[in-house]
């Protein structure tokens, strides 16, 4: 009887055991399939995040939506983030075509606000010698081509030295060092940029034309900010320090120099050789300045027209 009862018990429990085993296997298979279903969108989010991190936003495709709510929310949020980053890049690129790139970055970081400030900065003003007469030979198209080639080269030099170009005035360039980007050695950077600008004019042509430029640098208090009409503002700098830099540039023609810096700039320069130029009386008549220096013996030139 014992053996018979045992067999009967096994016969009764076998179907339940087999059913349980089948359910277990089905559960395992379902878990594997579900895990793969989860893993694929998660892996795509991870791979897309790495692409975003590399800065290649153009290569990031929109993540597909998912029937699982949590994954669907994650995909939607990720897509919105990428679209926002693309818009931000487009705004920065667009702004950078009309205002200095560093000003555009500061604007974006500040939520579109760029507060006016008064600070000490080194101001650089340059222009092309003899360019007014040259435009008569170049014509409209040639003038624009030469200016664009020249400005592109000079802006690259100025920005490499930490300067921010705030204005193009005819054939002139107005750049500032120490605002809006802080630079403790702003006078050194301004003079380094000026010397490289002179060297570039000596060794390069611009749209096929050989050009010469003159540079004036002054260090002093300036007011920097966005000015203009309500719907059209320009970031620029104001103050006597700016006017003096422009006058120093013009005085190069009289003194036969390429670079002139004021005494306030010279006092901050240690790594460049400077030489005194001009007389006290002449400086007072033209600039009301007590000290003028040239950018070094390499910039010593004879008088020239322009």
Image (spheres, grey):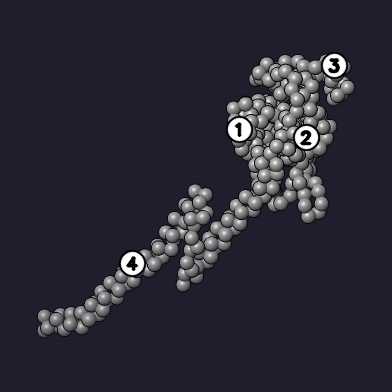
Of the residues tagged 3 and 4, which is closer to the observer? 3
What residue is drawn where x is 73% and y is 38%? 136
Callout 2: SS: strand
Residue 49 badge: none
x then y, percent, for residue 183? 68, 32
Between label 2 and label 4, give the one nearer the viewer. 2
Q: Give residue 3's quadrant in the image.
A: bottom left
Residue bearing the label numbered 2: 119
Closer to us: mark 3 or mark 1?
1
CA gap, disc 1 to disc 4?
68 Å
Residue 216 pos. (x, y %): 75, 27
- Between marks 2 and 3 in the image, the one whose residue lies nearer the viewer: 3
Q: Residue 145 in the image: state x and y as whole percent.
A: 65, 42
Q: Residue at x 81, y 54 (%)?
A: 230
Question: In terms of sequence position, does the residue under pointer 2 or pointer 1 come before the other?
Answer: 2
Q: Are marks 2 and 4 in contact (CB under 8 Å)?
A: no
Q: Which label lies toward us, 1 or 4?
A: 1
Residue 31 screen position, x and y as percent: 35, 68
**Which residue, given by chain and number where applicable, does mark 4 sit on?**
32
> Sequence order check: which comes first, mark 3 or mark 4?
4
Q: Are marks 2 and 3 in contact (CB under 8 Å)?
A: no
Disc 4 crowd, CA 10 A, few/some/many (<14, 14-19, 20+) = few
Nearest to the observer: residue 131 or residue 196 = 131
Using the image as rendered, state which of residue 43 and residue 237 is in the foreground.
Answer: 237
* Residue farthest front in this picture: 137
Q: Which residue is mark 1?
A: 205
Dot 3: element: helix
- Name the residue carrying label 3: 280
Residue at 74% across, 34% down:
133
In terms of sequence position, does the residue under pointer 1 or pointer 4 come before the other? 4
How dense is the environment of label 3, judged by Cα within 10 Å: few (below 14), some, or many (20 and up)? few
Q: Nearer the viewer, residue 62 or 127?
A: 127
């Amino acid at each position: 009887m014992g053996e018979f009862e045992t067999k009967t018990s096994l016969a009764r429990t076998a179907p339940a055991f087999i059913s349980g085993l089948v359910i277990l296997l089905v559960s395992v298979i379902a878990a594997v399939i579900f895990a793969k279903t989860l893993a694929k969108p998660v892996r795509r989010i991870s791979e897309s995040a790495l692409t975003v991190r590399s800065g290649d936003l153009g290569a990031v495709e929109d993540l597909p939506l998912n029937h699982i709510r949590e994954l669907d929310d994650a995909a939607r949020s990720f897509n919105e983030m990428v679209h926002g980053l693309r818009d931000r890049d487009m705004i920065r690129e667009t702004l950078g075509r009309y205002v200095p790139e560093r000003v555009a970055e500061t604007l974006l970081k500040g939520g579109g606000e760029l507060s006016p400030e008064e600070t000490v900065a080194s101001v650089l003003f340059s222009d092309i010698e003899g360019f007014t007469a040259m435009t008569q030979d170049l014509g409209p198209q040639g003038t624009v081509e030469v200016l664009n080639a020249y400005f592109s080269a000079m802006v690259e030099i100025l920005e490499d030295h930490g300067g921010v170009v705030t204005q193009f005035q005819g054939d002139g360039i107005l750049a500032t060092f120490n605002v809006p980007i802080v630079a403790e050695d702003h006078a050194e950077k301004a003079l380094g940029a000026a010397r490289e600008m002179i060297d570039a004019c000596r060794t390069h042509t611009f749209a096929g034309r050989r050009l010469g430029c003159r540079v004036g640098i002054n260090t002093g208090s300036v007011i920097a900010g966005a000015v203009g009409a309500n719907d059209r503002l320009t970031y620029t700098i104001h103050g006597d320090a700016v006017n003096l830099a422009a006058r120093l540039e013009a005085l190069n023609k009289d003194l036969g120099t390429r670079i002139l810096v004021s005494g306030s700039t010279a006092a901050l320069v240690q790594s460049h050789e400077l030489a005194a130029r001009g007389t006290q009386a002449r400086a007072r008549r033209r600039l009301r300045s007590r000290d003028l220096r040239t950018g070094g013996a390499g910039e010593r030139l004879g008088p020239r027209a322009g």
